[in-house]
Image (cartoon, rainbow, N blue to C red):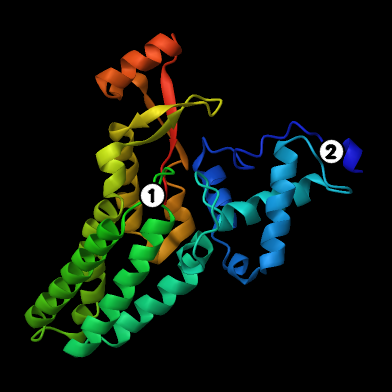
Amino acid sequence: MSSELDTNINIKEPRWDQGTFMGRAKHFFTVTDPRNILLSKEQLETARQIIQDYRQGIVSPGLTEDELWRAKYIYDSAFHPDTGEKMIVIGRMSAQVPMNMTITGCMMTFYKTTPAVVFWQWINQSFNAIVNYTNRSGDAPITVSQLGTAYVSATTGAVATALGLNALTKHVSPLIGRFVPFAAVAAANCINIPLMRQRELKYGIPITDDNDNRLGESKHAAQQAITQVGLVGFCLVFATPLCCALFPQKSSMSVSRLEPELQEKIKASHPGLERVYFNKGL
C-alpha cells in the first residue's frame, strides 16, 4: 500500500551501490536500456511527476518501491541531472547503443570512397556533438559559437584523419582498412569532448558536499570529469554500459585539490569538510 512505502528512500542516488563496478554496471545497464527511447511523452511526464512528488514527501497512491525505482530510471534517462530539462532524444544514454551500432556499421561498410568517408564521419560527429552537449556537466548554458566551434573542429579532424589513413592503407589488406573508421572516431572524440564542454573548463562545474549542498564551481573538478569522460569515450561504441560504469556518475575529489580561493571559501563555510562531489557528465 502507498502508505507503507518508505518515504526516506534516497532516490538522488542510484539503486545499486556505486562504490562497486558491478553496482555501477547494473545502474548504467538500466540507464542505457534502448527501450527507454520508445517511451511516450506521457510516460516520461508521469515518471517526472512521481519523482518530483516523492522528493517533496508525496507518495502516489498505490506506488510500490519497484515502481518508484522504475520511475527514477525513466526520469534519469530523459532529464538532465543538473538542469532538469528534457534531453534531446538521440543525445540520451538510452540511444547510445542503437545509434552507435548503426553509425559504426555504416562507417565500416562504406569506407572505400572519399564521399562516403566524408559523409559518415560528418554524421558521426554530428551525433557526438549532440551527445556531448546533451550530457554536459553543470547547469550553465553553452553558446552557439562554442557549439559551432566544437562541431566544425571535430568533424574536420575526423574527416582529415580518415582520409589520411585511407591513403596510407590502399596497399594493405582490406581487413586493416576496416579499422580506419575507429582511428578516425578516436581522433575526433579527442577534439569533440573538450571543445563541446569548453565552458566547463573555463568557468568550472558545480561542486557539492555529500548532502548535495552547492559549494561553488571548480575548474579542477571539470578537468577531472572531462578526463574521465574522455577515457570512457574511446570505448562507448563497443560497450556503453560497462564503460560508463568505470567511474561513478557522482564523482568526488579532495578539497585540497580545488583552486586555492575555493578551498578558503569552503574552509570558512564548511570547516572540516574533506571531499566535494560533482556530476561527471557522460
Decide if residue 255 is on the left or right side of residue 152.
right
Q: Earlier in the sequence, mark 1 or mark 2?
A: 2
Q: Nearer the viewer, residue 159 or 202?
A: 202
Q: Nearer the viewer, residue 226 or 267?
A: 267
Tell me what residue is drawn at x 43 percent, y 25 percent: 276
Instruction: Name the amino acid, label 2.
Output: Leu
Position of residue 264 measured from the top left corner of the image (x, y, whole percent): 32, 13
Q: Quadrant of residue 11?
A: top right
Position of residue 268 measured from the top left corner of the image (x, y, whole percent): 39, 9
Position of residue 13 measured from the top left corner of the image (x, y, whole percent): 59, 38
- Could you say whether the residue bearing mark 1 is in a helix, strand or loop? loop
Instruction: Name the amino acid, label 1.
Output: Pro
Tell me what residue is drawn at x 28 percent, y 19 percent: 261
Q: Nearer the viewer, residue 194 or 46?
A: 46
Mark-to-mark CA distance, 1 and 2: 38 Å
Tell me what residue is drawn at x 22 percent, y 57 percent: 190
In the rendered structure, find residue 5 and report the number of the disc placed on it. Answer: 2
Q: Quadrant of the N terminus?
A: top right
Position of residue 114 measured from the top left corner of the image (x, y, whole percent): 17, 87
Decide if residue 259 is on the left or right side of residue 53.
left
The residue labelled by disc 1 is 141
Does any portion of residue 176 appear in the rendered image? yes
Q: Residue furthest front?
A: 144
240 vs 267: above or below: below
In the rendered structure, find residue 218 and report the number of the disc placed on it. Answer: none
Q: How many marks?
A: 2
